[in-house]
Amino acid sequence: MSSVCIEIVEGNPHLRSLLSWHLQQVGYRVYQAASLYQAREVFLTRQPTLVILDSELADGDGIEFCRWLQRQQQPLILMLSARNTETDIVAGLKAGADDYLTKPFGMQEFLARVEALVRRNRTPVAPAYLDYGNLHIDLVQRRVCFQGEYIDLTPQEFSLLYVLAQAGGVPLSRSELLRRAWPDAIDNPRTIDTHVLSLRKKVEIDPRQPSLIQTVRNVGYRFNLEILKTSIAKPSEVAHNQKLPAEIRSTQQSALSSQL
């Protein structure tokens, strides 16, 4: 049971602490958040199995955050709310909640609902990392290893790279990338271009002629998984070779061609 990670997003500090204590007593690992801003940070860092979400928070609507969660790793969601009309419950479930519990509630019922949701998620187990040949994406530590070297990415660059890689080579439009990879709603699709340019500088051999993150005209971008299966020189090696005289580079390239 201790392997299950739960995030509690609740504005009431007393209720938040009480729920956390009871969950920890039965063996769950629990992380708390008092606002939507904290909730995003905790989710991206801890990747919880279950998110217990208050529908009304001081800095935003829990329903919208529920929709954002569904665009991420799709964790299980138990929504807590003082709103108990049929319309409210339907709205929460349609936003992506797996269960809806109205306040006030009994602690035994709360724990039983948590246990039922966790049982639902026992199989399959979410992967801790993704491997694409020369690219290794660690979903727990949120780190990327490319060509045997760790790449220093910002949180947003990591999210963008992950979404592109997970698409399996299918082109994604700028609006789709914004929807999947950005925690907040952004109206400017050109934001994607800026981050792709930054990402290319870190993972492409030649950012001016990108082969890994490809531009698809009139669509957006795609991730070239095929190139990861081949042996490519590291960016540092390419930079070193570009400093050599032309005749030496030519000799090296001829030697490399003879080995292929």
Image (cartoon, grey):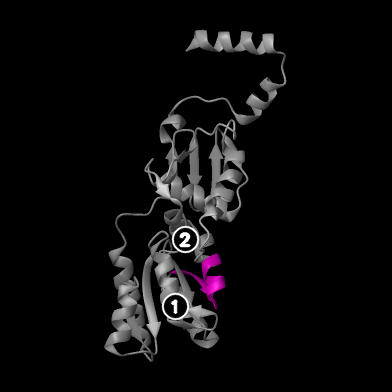
What residue is shown at x 56% (from left), y 31% (from top)?
209
What residue is shown at x 39% (from left), y 82% (from top)?
80
Residue under numbered circle 2: 47
Q: Residue 192 versus residue 249: which sits nearer the camera?
A: 192
Amino acid type of the residue that numbered disc 2 sits on in the rendered structure: Gln
Question: Residue 180's spot in the image, x, y percent?
Answer: 44, 57
Residue under numbered circle 1: 62
Residue 143 lies, with reference to residue 11, above or below; the image says above
Q: Residue 255 versus residue 45: which sits nearer the camera?
A: 255
Other residues around mark 1 within 10 Å, as few (<14) / some (14–19) / many (≥20):
many
Point out the stretch of residues depicted in magenta: 28-41
Question: Residue 108's spot in the image, x, y percent?
Answer: 34, 84
Q: Please say if the residues under marks 1 and 2 sit with CB atoms less than 8 Å apart.
A: no
What residue is shown at x 44% (from left), y 60% (from top)?
179
Amino acid type of the residue that numbered disc 1 sits on in the rendered structure: Gly
**Distance from label 1 to label 2 (Cα)?**
18 Å
Quadrant in the picture for residue 3: bottom left
Quadrant in the picture for residue 45: bottom right
Question: Residue 132's spot in the image, x, y percent?
Answer: 43, 37
What residue is shown at x 54% (from left), y 83% (from top)?
58
Residue 64 lies, with reference to residue 151, above or below; the image says below
- Indicate left or right for 80 with 231 as reference: left
Image quadrant holding the N terminus, namely: bottom left
Q: Along the polypeptide, which appears first: circle 1 or circle 2?
A: 2
Question: Residue 84's spot in the image, x, y percent?
Answer: 33, 90
